[in-house]
Image (cartoon, rainbow, N blue to C red):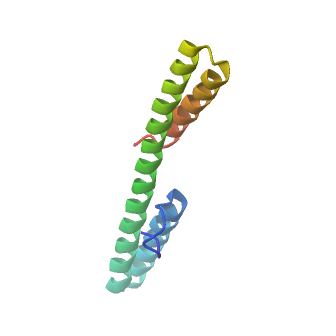
Amino acid sequence: MSSQSSQEPSKATGQYHSLKGTAVETVGDVTGLQSWVQSGKEEHAKGEAEYNAAQAKGYAEGVTDRAGGYKDSVVGAVTGDKAQQASGNVRNEKGQTQQEINKPT
């Protein structure tokens, strides 16, 4: 994962380490240096794991926003609070977008 264990997983950092690991592995293949091949494979795997963790976290946050937004929208509609209803709709749509962006492949 990232260099600091307290950091949240990041899709960008995960992609960076995945690509860097692939490059290091390729250099190791070309030069015949097994330590580089192994190091590259490990960094690639860690990058993929970080990317997947960030994707899962983003998807879960989207689920939470969708559910909370839907609840606020319904409560606003029932109570006649148009501001709460509109705010709930916005949060629901934000959550839906976040889920689509982080949908597992």
The x and y percentages for residue 38 are 32, 78
The x and y percentages for residue 101 are 52, 41
* Nearer to us in this view, 6 or 84: 84
* Rendered-image quadrant of the N terminus: bottom left
* Nearer to us in this view, 71 or 61: 71
Residue 37 lies in quadrant = bottom left
The x and y percentages for residue 20 are 49, 71
Residue for point 38% across, 68% down: 46
Residue for point 45% across, 38% down: 64
* Nearer to us in this view, 40 or 65: 65
The x and y percentages for residue 4 are 47, 75
Residue for point 38% across, 82% down: 36
Q: Is residue 83 left or right of residue 21?
A: right
* Nearer to us in this view, 61 or 10: 61
* Rendered-image quadrant of the C terminus: top left
Q: Is residue 60 above or below residue 97?
A: below
Residue 45 lies in quadrant = bottom left
| Residue farthest to the right, as pictured | 83
Q: Is residue 98 above or below residue 84?
A: below
Residue for point 59% across, 25% down: 89
